[in-house]
Amino acid sequence: MTTLVRLASELDFAGWRTAARALRLNGVAPDQVAWTVGREAELYADAEPLPQAPETAAFAAPRAFLALAEALSMHRAPERFALAYRLLWRLAGQPNLLSLITDPEVERANRMAREVERAAYRMKQYVRFRKVADEAGGEAYIAWIEPEHRALARAAPFFVDRFANMAWAILTPDQTVRWRDGALEFGPGAPREAAPKDDELEAMWRTYFASTFNPARLKVKAMTTQMPKRLWRNLPEAELIPSMIAQAARRSDAMVANPPSEPARRTARAIQRKVRDAPYDDGYRPNSTQEVWAAVDACRRCELWRNATQGVAGEGPARAALMLVGEQPGDQEDLAGKPFVGPAGQLLNRALEEAGVPRDLTYVTNAVKHFKFEPRGKRRIHAKPNAGEIRACRWWLDSERRLVKPKVIVALGATAGQAVFGHAVSVMKDRGAPESLGDGATGLLTVHPSYMLRIPDEADKARAYALFVQDLKQAWSLAA
Ligand code: URA
């Protein structure tokens, strides 16, 4: 006999929780349950009503599972509530179920949760507020967006953070959220017409967007998170998009050399599925630098992935006698998915050439794999990774070291030094002194290439550059 659950709305996670608890405590198996929303229940005329949960029975689901179930509840797939209940049911016999990331149901649930996260991320990127007069004659801002999943609750804290002093509302077909006088209020969905269409902000957005449109971002993003056309409709700048895309290929060629091939992308996606959301102590070890490259994008060991375009792993031969470690990808590296391609990279290339070190024989990487920045107007200003972020990312650097087996590792700057040597270093004091590292490699510390870029005086700059070239020569001869 089927037991009928009636949820109040598509987003009724609280209702799901209550029902799932009652079902579990009464031993109702997943295949005996029909999860319905609103009037769908009418299709199940003969179903059993939901049993009550015994009042005294105790039952606690693991926190990680509840977080997963809540994310699932925001997904648009009709089977999400049933899938969440199946996992809860199976957890009774397999407490470690969620760590079995190749289990088809766990994998599916994780993928769906990621899709919800991505929908929330896109909302943060593509919500555009329009100014209106509020009831009291003041200013308020309203945005309309059709997210791919019902992820508004996930995205709302971001807007509270950014626009704490404004009154605003975000309307979606499923749900609305309003921020006013320091309080966040969720309500039912709203039609598109409820948000104003035109106002003076649109022209500004259009200008802003055209000037910041980055063809490289279009290409790189297309790999995993291309903005669906459905979202374009919400953007005042949407009318500019087709012509900019038409020009993008030509312009981006100059900005991004050799994007990964299609088979590499397929491998990448498979590995990313394996890494993302996996517990990090489950014995997973990348088997190749190609795998590191693919997997790093899925890393969630710290929060930096949230704002970066992608993870940027090292680049170079699978085995190399010399490894160069920088701090973190910069703006251009973040877009291109490759280390040291921006201004610091160009200086590094020049210095390597002068030192007689072929860059394509060295493995070039960073201590931290996601770009950390502060948005300032249209620009993304580099922000220094903190000790926790360096520590979290060291797992990747250690993987690269284990695989590439360099004889010599050059740390470019103090952040890289901290990651390579495992303790705080001073570039002024420790520069150029070879130190044996635990894995048999020799570590050398030098300045970061961007240090030279910041020196205003040309003579000082030239001196610093010459010393840098010297350090690279020393490293190359030690690696020979
Ligand atoms: N600076 C770094 O430390 N690494 C890069 O990849 C680019 C700039």
Image (cartoon, helix red, strand yellow):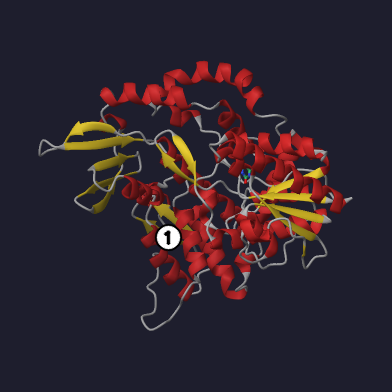
Residue at 53%, 37% in the rendered image:
456
- Type of amino acid under label 1: Leu
Q: Nearer the viewer, residue 9 or 431?
A: 431
- Image-quadrant location for residue 236: top left
* Residue 193 visible (yes or no): yes
Q: Nearer the viewer, residue 334 or 75?
A: 334
Residue at far front of view: 459
Residue 127, horizontal then vertical, whole percent: 38, 36
- Image-quadrant location for residue 124: top left
238 in relation to 317, above or below: above
Ligand 1 within 8 Å of the CB at mark 1 = no
- Judge from the rendering whether residue 479 lies leftward or rightward of residue 446; answer left or right: right
Within 10 Å of the Cα at label 1, are there few (<14), some (14-19), or many (20+) other Cα atoms? many
Residue at 29%, 26% in the rendered image:
201
Residue at far right of view: 480
The mark total stands at 1
Q: Nearer the viewer, residue 331 or 168?
A: 331
* Residue 339 visible (yes or no): no
- Judge from the rendering whether residue 417 lies leftward or rightward of residue 120; answer left or right: right
Residue at far bottom of view: 56
Residue at 74%, 44% in the rendered image:
267
Residue 327, horizontal then vertical, whole percent: 62, 50
174 in relation to 410, above or below: above
Residue 304, horizontal then vertical, whole percent: 53, 52
Residue identified by numbered label 1: 4
Residue 318, horizontal then vertical, whole percent: 83, 48
* Ligand 1: image quarter: top right
431 in relation to 133, above or below: below
Residue at 52%, 19% in the rendered image:
244
Q: Nearer the viewer, residue 244 or 146?
A: 244
The kind of secondary structure element at disc 1 is strand
- Judge from the rendering whether residue 89 lies leftward or rightward of residue 73; answer left or right: right
